[in-house]
C-alpha cells in the first residue's frame, strides 16, 4: 500500500479532488504522516511483537552508557554478553529500584554481577551494570519497536504488516 492509494480513497470518501484546496497531495501527506505515527503507536500497543526489530552494538570495556537507537519508539528487551559466549537478559531498573549510592565504577562493580546484569534507561541512553571490564564485540542486543519514518511523497513505503493496512 502506498500513500497514493490512501489519497485516492480519501478523495472518494470526501468527494474532493486533487485540484481543490483540501484534497491535494501535499495537504493529504501532512495529515497522513500525523495519522500514520498515531496509528502505528496504537498497533504497537495492540501487538508489539509484529513491529519489533533487533540491533547489536559492542560492549566496550570501561564504558557505562550506550546510545539508544535514533528510531526507537519503545524498548522491549536488552541482552548482554560480557564474555562473548553466555548471553544474559538485562533487567531494566525502574526509578524505585535504583539505590541511593555512589555510581562510581568500583561501587557498580561490587553491587552488580555479569551473571545478572542490570540497566538504567534514562533519556536517550542505556547505562549498563556492571560496567564491562573488556570489550565484547556485538555484546549488547537491543530488541525494540522502530518508529516509522516520515512518508516523504505519495510513493513512500508504508511500513506496517499487511493485516493492519486496512486501518490506515
Image: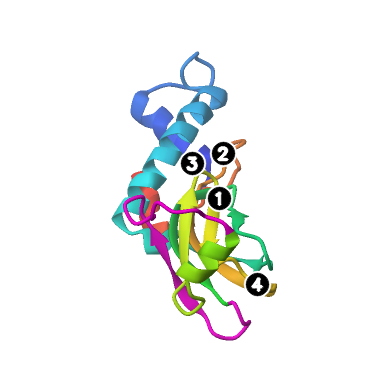
Residue 53 is situated, as x and y percent measured from the top left of the image, at 51, 63
Foreground residue, 92 or 11? 92
Give the CA separation, mark 4 to mark 3: 53 Å
Most common SS among magenta residues: loop
Location of residue 85 (image quadrant): bottom right
Residue 133 marker: 4
Q: Which residue is mark 2?
A: 150
Secondary structure under tag 4 reads loop
Which one is in front in this view, the residue at disc 3 or the one at disc 1?
1
CB under 8 Å between callouts 2 and 1? no
Which one is earlier in the sequence, the residue at label 4 or at label 3?
3
Point 53% across, 45% down: residue = 2
From this viewpoint, is residue 160 visible? no
Which one is earlier in the sequence, the residue at label 2 or at label 4?
4
Horizontal side of residue 151 vs 58, given as left or right? left
Foreground residue, 42 or 112? 112
Which one is earlier in the sequence, the residue at label 3 or at label 1?
3
Q: Which residue is mark 3?
A: 5
Residue 62 is situated, as x and y percent measured from the top left of the image, at 67, 64
Label 3: few (<14), some (14–19) or many (≥20) C-alpha neighbours in 10 Å: few
Give the CA separation, mark 2 to mark 4: 40 Å
Q: Which residue is mark 1?
A: 125
Horizontal side of residue 77 vs 150, given as left or right? left
User: Which segment did they paint magenta?
Assistant: 82-104
Which one is in front in this view, the residue at disc 2 or the one at disc 3?
2
CB under 8 Å between callouts 4 and 3? no
Give the CA separation, mark 3 to mark 1: 38 Å
Amino acid at each position: 500500500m502506498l500513500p497514493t492509494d490512501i489519497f485516492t480513497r480519501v478523495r472518494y470518501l470526501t468527494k474532493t479532488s486533487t485540484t481543490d484546496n483540501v484534497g491535494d497531495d501535499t495537504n493529504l501527506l501532512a495529515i497522513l504522516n500525523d495519522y500514520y505515527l498515531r496509528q502505528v503507536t496504537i498497533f504497537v500497543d495492540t501487538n508489539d511483537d509484529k513491529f519489533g526489530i533487533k540491533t547489536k552494538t559492542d560492549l566496550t570495556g570501561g564504558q557505562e552508557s550506550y546510545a539508544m537507537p535514533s528510531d526507537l519508539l519503545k524498548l522491549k528487551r536488552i541482552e548482554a554478553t560480557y564474555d562473548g559466549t553466555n548471553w544474559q537478559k538485562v533487567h531494566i531498573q525502574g526509578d524505585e529500584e535504583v539505590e541511593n549510592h555512589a555510581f562510581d565504577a568500583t561501587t557498580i562493580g561490587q553491587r552488580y554481577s555479569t551473571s545478572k546484569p542490570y540497566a538504567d534507561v534514562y533519556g536517550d541512553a542505556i547505562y549498563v551494570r556492571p560496567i564491562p571490564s573488556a570489550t565484547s564485540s556485538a555484546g549488547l542486543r537491543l530488541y525494540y519497536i522502530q518508529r516509522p519514518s516520515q512518508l516523504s511523497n505519495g510513493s513512500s513505503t508504508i511500513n506496517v504488516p499487511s493485516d493492519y493496512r486496512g486501518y490506515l
